């Protein structure tokens, strides 16, 4: 296997990328960099593709978790020759404990600027790069044995969002839905992996059922199954006008402009 080889899996997120489902959407608002290794998991959201070296402390990452070390930050290296084999790579240095010790991961040169999934040649470490479009609004449709809810948001969710039963249109024939919470980049399963999670709180709010979906699912439109129960799903919808809707809107604007011009001409005659 060559160092930094590009890989694709059957995960909905990577499938969406590999089949170009996002290509026709608006330009990206942020670029997500998700690294998963035996030592650490983290997600970094950048305003654009990384074109130069970048240092960020753990506080600059959405989440940096490790069951082995204390994550103090990471460095992104563009065009690194750290393997000293003559090739260039895009590399990530993990700083842990007091910042003096570092683990390095090497991916294909140009990986930081190309959406996809990449694997380090020397360790079972993966880097997923996702260009997240500037969707004006998103809808989150949850369905499972415990109940359903539909929650709207002003753009993709990257943090934690609480919503009352009324706000989320939460319904259940099994329990009394009290409220729901959506967690971006949760490590609640304590497996070392990161997930986007949903807490469905019921009764008086003191009891909860948790559901875990692939990390970054809340940012990329698609339907995702809970990692423990595929019958529980969340569908993420980009609430943007269809091409036909855009055409009607433009036609309406054109007609409105024509009417205004005629009125002005009549008023001056």
Image (cartoon, helix red, strand yellow):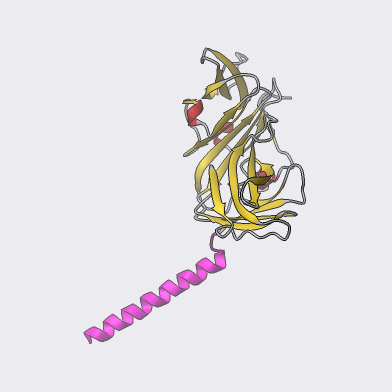
The C terminus - image quarter: bottom left
Up-down: is 165 above or below 213?
Answer: below
Give the residues drawn in magenta, as a range: 240-269
**Left/right of residue 136 with respect to residue 42 in the rendered view:** left
Instruction: Inspect the magenta stretch and tell me whether residue 204 lies in it.
Output: no
Predominant SS of the magenta segment? helix
Residue 265 placed where, x, y %?
27, 83
Which residue ends up furthest to the front in the rendered image? 204
The N terminus - image quarter: top right
Residue 211 placed where, x, y %?
69, 45
- What residue is shown at x 64% (from left), y 49% (from top)? 201
Instruction: Inspect the magenta stretch and tell me whether residue 260 lies in it.
Output: yes
- What residue is shown at x 62% (from left), y 51% (from top)? 204
Question: Can residue 23 be seen at all in this image of the molecule?
Answer: yes
Q: Could you say which quadrant of the image residue 256 lies in? A: bottom left
Q: Could you say which quadrant of the image residue 176 lies in? A: bottom right
Which residue ends up furthest to the left in the rendered image? 268
Q: Nearer the viewer, residue 15 or 85?
A: 15
- What residue is shown at x 72% (from left), y 61% (from top)? 173
Residue 203 placed where, x, y %?
65, 52
- What residue is shown at x 37% (from left), y 75% (from top)? 257
Question: Can residue 157 be seen at all in this image of the molecule?
Answer: no
Residue 22 placed where, x, y %?
60, 50
Q: Nearer the viewer, residue 86 or 104?
A: 104
Up-down: is 82 above or below 266?
Answer: above
């Amino acid at each position: 296997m060559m160092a930094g080889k590009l890989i694709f899996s059957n995960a909905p997120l990577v499938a969406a990328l590999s089949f170009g489902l996002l290509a026709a959407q608006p330009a990206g608002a942020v670029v997500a960099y998700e690294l998963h290794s035996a030592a650490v998991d983290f997600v970094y959201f950048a305003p654009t593709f990384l074109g130069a070296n970048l240092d960020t402390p753990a506080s600059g990452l959405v989440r940096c978790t490790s069951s082995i070390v204390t994550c103090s930050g990471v460095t992104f290296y563009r065009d690194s020759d750290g393997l000293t084999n003559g090739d260039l790579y895009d590399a990530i240095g993990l700083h842990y404990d007091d910042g003096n010790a570092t683990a390095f991961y090497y991916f294909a040169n140009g990986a930081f600027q190309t959406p996809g999934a990449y694997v380090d040649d020397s360790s079972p470490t993966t880097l997923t790069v996702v260009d997240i479009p500037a969707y004006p609004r998103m809808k989150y449709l949850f369905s499972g044995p415990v109940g359903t809810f539909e929650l709207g948001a002003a753009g993709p969710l990257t943090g934690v969002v609480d919503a009352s039963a009324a706000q989320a249109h939460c319904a259940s024939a099994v329990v009394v839905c009290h409220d729901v919470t959506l967690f971006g980049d949760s490590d609640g399963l304590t497996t070392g992996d990161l997930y986007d999670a949903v807490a469905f709180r019921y009764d008086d709010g003191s009891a909860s059922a948790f559901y875990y979906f692939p990390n970054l699912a809340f940012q990329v439109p698609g339907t995702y199954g809970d990692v423990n129960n595929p019958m529980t799903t969340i569908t993420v919808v980009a609430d943007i006008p269809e091409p036909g809707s855009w055409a009607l809107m433009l036609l309406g604007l054109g007609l409105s402009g024509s009417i205004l011009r005629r009125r002005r001409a009549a008023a001056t005659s």
